[in-house]
Amino acid sequence: MVCGGFSCSKNALITLNVLYIIVAIILIGVAAYSRLAAVVVSLGLVGGIIACGVFLFFISLVGLIGAVRHHQVMLFFYMIILFILFLLQFSLGCACLAVNKDQEISLVRNGWMAADAKLKDNIQYKLDCCGFEDWNLNISLPLGHPACDTATCCHNSDAKCCKGDVGDIVTAEEDDCPCVTCLERFKPRIHEAFSITGGIGLFFSFTEIVGVWLALRYRNMKDPEADPSAFL
């Protein structure tokens, strides 16, 4: 087998698509972790990475079958779709890495404002925090929150932020809340989510260009075991 020949290109394309399947699983897993880490925020960019991962998984199966069978039509659509996927994944990866801290906080704030009382209570319990930026128990306000009695930091505490009545506006001067705000919990999680997802998405997007080039090269080769009179 000559390197660069038909068999070499075929095996390389098969190996690359197996790698893509693994990459797709990694992308889906990392992006899913990012969404769980963010908890309250519906992160469109991270959701886009998940969609790219799912799409990459299925297109890799098409490429794998096309490589094994040297199927011209499947390889053609594989190249086109893989290139489009590269553009999308590259753009989403850059967008994730370009988000600054102020934008991250804005995303979290908007997510908190859109969340209902049950979700806010669940967040306070999971992250062991109380309130978003302050201890405002008026749940009818966008940044208000329910009492934090379910949070571990509020156990055995009579602070107003923990057991106050709904509608209370608690300030730092009125109450020494034993809990940190949820924003403080969110900051490192959101930054980590965008950094990891964007970095992995951007890194693996470049391998898709290799896949396009290899598929194009392999598609235009003649199968040495095929009928010599067959036209490629």
Image (cartoon, rainbow, N blue to C red):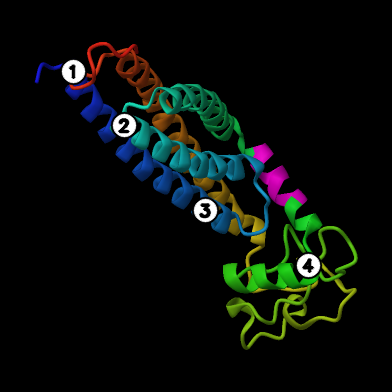
For the point 82% across and 64% down, the residue is 144
Amino acid type assigned to the residue bearing label 1 in the image: Pro
Q: Are marks 3 and 1 in contact (CB under 8 Å)?
A: no
In terms of sequence position, does the residue under pointer 4 or pointer 3 come before the other? 3
Which of the pair 214/96 is nearer the observer?
214
User: SS at mark 3?
Assistant: helix
Q: Kindly indicate the quadrant of the structure image that contains residue 229.
A: top left
In terms of sequence position, does the residue under pointer 1 or pointer 4 come before the other? 4
In terms of sequence position, does the residue under pointer 2 or pointer 4 come before the other? 2
Tell me the magenta residue range: 102-110
Instruction: Estimate the spatial distance between the alpha carbons at disc 1 and disc 4, rounded to whole Å.
Output: 83 Å
Amino acid type assigned to the residue bearing label 2 in the image: Arg
Please tell me whether mark 3 or mark 2 is closer to you in this view: 2
Q: Horizontal and vertical percent for residue 179? A: 63, 70
Instruction: Estimate the spatial distance between the alpha carbons at disc 3 and disc 2, rounded to whole Å.
Output: 34 Å
* Above-or-below relation of 134 to 76: below
Which of the pair 23/58 is nearer the observer?
58
How many residues crowd around disc 1 within 10 Å: few (fewer than 14), some, or many (20 or more)? few
Q: Residue beneath label 1, please?
A: 224
Q: Horizontal and vertical percent for residue 137? A: 83, 71
How many residues crowd around disc 2 within 10 Å: few (fewer than 14), some, or many (20 or more)? few
Which of the pair 135/225 is nearer the observer?
225
Q: Horizontal and vertical percent for residue 172? A: 75, 66
Q: Are marks 1 and 4 in contact (CB under 8 Å)?
A: no
